[in-house]
């Protein structure tokens, strides 16, 4: 008998609670009077992450003329919104670091998520949306449900991947046939348990069916389209081998001209490598998963 | 007449339709010859595309691929996009991108 989605999420929560470091950083950034020193104190719990921030601030990405030697300065250079994305990404990466290579190449998985995140941020900017970094976060997390599947039901997802390939079906539809639910639903459930903002929950839960979101149709439509662009450009892979179906109404509801897609592609190519460096720290392969003591 | 993205608009082009903002307010009338200042204003107001008088040549220079490679790329692209409406302009752009990317990788 296959496990229910609720049962899987309960299993995941036992080993993968949202790291306190992210919760603390998020609370601090949401409060009106958050000082840099307070952020530094929180980050000191995770020395690997602090060291990474310093390296990032000193990297060519920010091209700062003098050496940055304190975490406090590094936060100023990197920016608080980007700090939130980095802490969340590195926290989630740690939680799902031990997924076997035979199932999915984790670097490829995160590259797909980053391509979706960057596309979403570009589309949101073109729409002049407020809080564009939220779209970046939503893109990073949109396929987290698949990581839960790789961890909790590896045999079923492996069968689903083979079957989807043989039948040329979309993987999320085959997941539903085999398990009774897809990765999007699982991801949404986990983010809800983690008490992340509703926009992030809906963006994950409904990224294949954006009109099912009650309160964030436009925002979810952005992730839906960003995911299709990331798949089409084959930047990384989260296991899907075909291009998910574009919901025409979702495209209409974001209100951008059809031809804008070429601008998004050009801009994605410009920002992608930098974003990969930012999130994955490619020059430091084990850094993101080195310190697992923060959970 | 051609609808083109702001990135491809050049100074000296003539507007073929009024440019309006999201609220429908007219920012610039049809017939205006565009100057650098106009392009700056478009950027400020978030205008993404405008209609320009006359034919605007497509800038892309198509590489020459063998008919066999084009056919192979086309067939594979059709499989990858089989769950999408190939007549949708956005999907068409992504389909073309996928196909070109495949052919570029094959010959390089």
Image (cartoon, rainbow, N blue to C red):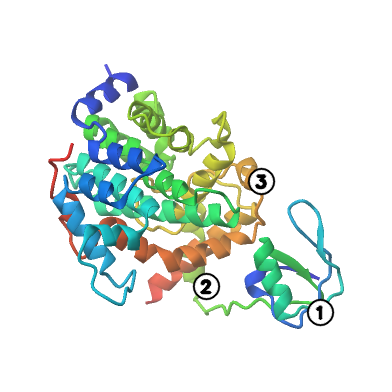
Which of the two discs, 1 and 3, sits closer to the camera?
1
Q: Is A106 placed left or right of A85 in the picture?
A: left
Q: Could you tell me if residue A156 is visible in this image?
A: yes
Asked if marks 1 and 3 touch (Cβ < 8 Å), the reply is no
Q: Are the numbered discs 1 and 2 placed on the same chain, yes or no? A: yes
Instruction: Say if A90 sits above or below A16 in the image.
Output: below
Q: Position of residue A280 (x, y in %)?
A: 26, 57
Please identify the residue farthest to the top as the structure is shown: A1
Instruction: Say if A231 sits above or below A96 in the image.
Output: below
Q: Residue at x 35, y 65 (%)?
A: A274
Q: Chain of mark 2?
A: B
Of pointers 1 and 2, the one earlier in the residue sequence: 1
Which of the two discs, 1 and 2, sits closer to the camera?
1
Asked if marks 2 and 3 touch (Cβ < 8 Å), the reply is no
Q: Are the numbered discs 2 and 3 placed on the same chain, yes or no? A: no
Task: Please give the residue where the numbered disc 1 appears in the rendered image.
Answer: B33
Q: Are the numbered discs 1 and 3 placed on the same chain, yes or no? A: no
Task: Please give the residue where the numbered disc 2 appears in the rendered image.
Answer: B67
Q: Chain of mark 3?
A: A
State how far apart marks 1 and 3 are (Cα).
Answer: 31 Å
Q: Residue at x 22, y 32 (%)?
A: A16
Q: Is A209 placed left or right of A157 in the picture?
A: right
Q: Chain of mark 1?
A: B
> Which quadrant: the C terminus of chain A?
top left
Residue A234 occupies quadrant: bottom left
Which of the two discs, 2 and 3, sits closer to the camera?
3
Task: Please give the residue where the numbered disc 3 appears in the rendered image.
Answer: A252
């Amino acid at each position: 008998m296959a496990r229910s989605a609720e049962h899987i999420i309960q299993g995941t929560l036992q080993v993968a609670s949202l790291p306190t470091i992210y919760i603390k950083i998020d609370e601090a950034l949401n409060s009106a009077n958050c000082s840099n020193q307070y952020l530094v104190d929180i980050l000191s719990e995770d020395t690997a992450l602090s060291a990474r921030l310093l390296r990032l601030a000193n990297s060519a990405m920010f091209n700062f003329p003098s050496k940055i030697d304190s975490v406090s300065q590094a936060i100023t250079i990197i920016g608080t919104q980007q700090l939130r994305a980095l802490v969340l990404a590195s926290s989630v990466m740690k939680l799902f670091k031990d997924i076997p290579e035979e199932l999915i190449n984790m670097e490829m998985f995160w590259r797909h998520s980053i391509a979706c995140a960057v596309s979403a941020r570009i589309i949101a900017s073109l729409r002049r949306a407020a809080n564009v970094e939220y779209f970046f976060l939503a893109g990073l997390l949109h396929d987290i449900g698949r990581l839960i599947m790789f961890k909790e039901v590896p045999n079923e997802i492996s069968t689903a991947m083979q079957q989807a390939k043989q039948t040329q079906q979309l993987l999320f539809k085959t997941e539903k046939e085999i398990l009774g639910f897809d990765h999007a639903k699982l991801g949404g459930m986990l983010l809800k348990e983690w008490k992340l903002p509703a926009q992030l929950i809906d963006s994950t839960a409904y990224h294949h069916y954006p009109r099912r979101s009650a309160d964030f149709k436009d925002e979810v439509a952005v992730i839906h389209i960003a995911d299709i662009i990331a798949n089409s450009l084959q930047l990384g892979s989260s296991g899907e081998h075909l291009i998910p179906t574009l919901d025409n109404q979702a495209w209409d509801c974001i209100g951008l001209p059809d031809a804008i897609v070429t601008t998004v592609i050009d801009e994605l190519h410009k920002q992608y490598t930098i974003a990969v460096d930012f999130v994955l720290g490619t020059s430091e392969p084990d850094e993101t998963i080195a310190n697992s003591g923060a959970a | 007449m051609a609808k083109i993205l702001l990135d491809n608009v050049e100074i000296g082009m003539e507007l073929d339709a009024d440019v309006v903002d999201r609220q429908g307010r007219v920012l610039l009338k049809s017939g205006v010859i565009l100057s650098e200042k106009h392009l700056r204003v478009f950027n400020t107001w978030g205008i993404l595309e405008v209609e320009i008088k006359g034919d605007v040549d497509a800038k892309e220079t198509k590489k020459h691929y063998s008919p066999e490679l084009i056919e192979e790329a086309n067939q594979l692209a059709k499989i990858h996009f089989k769950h999408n409406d190939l007549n949708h302009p956005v999907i068409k752009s992504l389909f073309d991108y996928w196909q070109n990317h495949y052919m570029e990788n094959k010959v390089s």
